């Protein structure tokens, strides 16, 4: 490449918050072990030396796709979303931890939206959407709603808070909207859940 070599480009991709989630396969003429190790240390997801076997490339790509599917499964269900303490700090996990921490900090703010999150992360709406969707297979808005609803479910076990207080605490200012969303998510209303827990 005229302006930079593949290793430099890989470094730029993997260190940039906006692109670090993109899998990279290095297909290169540099077959020596030092070049391979450098490529893998810089974050290449696969390193294939020329001349290459087409089947090897297909298998590497298939494996990368499978890894991406597993990542989607890991983050697809809120109930399975690991606590920040449980996550191995990889690029994707660091991003998800940061997003979750920011959203949890703003859980009670009904006005907090994706634009606020973009400002805090210093990324565009499109970059945030692509990266979050690529890692979790969910939208930010959908994830934030789930975060709020799960926090509400947790708070409903505290008898000192009434249902309206719980709804307001997690950022819902309309009680009927909160009840409808809660019922849709958990298959029972906040009132029914509270009766069941008492």
Image (cartoon, helix red, strand yellow):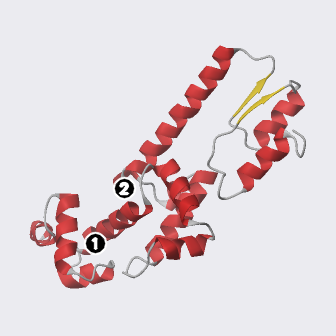
Is residue 108 left or right of 185 when viewed as pictured? right
Circle 1 residues within 10 Å: few <14, some 14–19, many ≥20: many
Give the x, y percent position of residue 63: 57, 28
Residues at circles 2 and 1 in contact by the CB criterion of under 8 Å: no
Q: Residue at x 53, y 59 (%)?
A: 96
Helix, strand or loop at disc 1? helix
Q: Which residue is mark 1?
A: 152
Q: Residue at x 80, y 16 (%)?
A: 51
Q: Distance from label 2 to label 1 (Cα)?
A: 14 Å
Give the x, y percent position of residue 164: 20, 83
Give the x, y percent position of residue 52: 75, 17
Q: Is residue 25 above or below residue 51?
A: below
Q: Earlier in the sequence, mark 2 or mark 1?
A: 2
Look at the image and tell me whether residue 63 can be seen: yes
Q: Which residue is mark 2?
A: 78
Look at the image and tell me whether residue 160 can be seen: no
Helix, strand or loop at disc 2? helix
Q: Which quadrant of the view contains residue 191? A: bottom left
Is residue 109 left or right of 31 when viewed as pictured? left
- Which quadrant: the C terminus? bottom left
Give the x, y percent position of residue 67: 54, 36
Is residue 18 left or right of 117 when viewed as pictured? right
Q: Is residue 86 above or below residue 108?
A: above
Circle 2 residues within 10 Å: few <14, some 14–19, many ≥20: few
Residue 70 or residue 180, whichever sits in front: 180
Residue sticking out furthest to the front? 2
């Amino acid at each position: 490449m005229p302006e930079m070599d593949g290793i430099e480009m890989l470094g730029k991709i993997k260190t940039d918050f906006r692109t670090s989630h993109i899998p990279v396969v290095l297909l290169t003429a540099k077959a020596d072990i030092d070049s391979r190790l450098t490529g893998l240390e810089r974050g290449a997801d696969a390193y294939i030396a020329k001349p290459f076997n087409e089947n090897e490339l297909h298998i590497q790509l298939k494996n990368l796709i499978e890894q991406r599917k597993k990542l989607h499964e890991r983050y697809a269900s809120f109930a399975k979303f690991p606590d920040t303490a449980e996550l191995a700090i990889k690029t994707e996990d660091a991003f998800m931890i940061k997003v979750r921490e920011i959203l949890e900090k703003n859980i009670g703010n009904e006005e907090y939206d994706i634009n606020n999150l973009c400002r805090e992360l210093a990324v565009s709406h499109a970059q945030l959407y692509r990266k979050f969707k690529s890692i979790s297979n969910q939208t930010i808005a959908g994830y934030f709603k789930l975060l709020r609803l799960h926090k509400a479910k947790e708070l409903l076990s505290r008898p000192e808070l009434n249902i309206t207080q719980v709804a307001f605490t997690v950022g819902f200012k309309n009680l009927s909207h909160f009840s409808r969303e809660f019922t849709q998510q958990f298959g029972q209303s906040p009132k029914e859940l509270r009766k069941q827990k008492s």
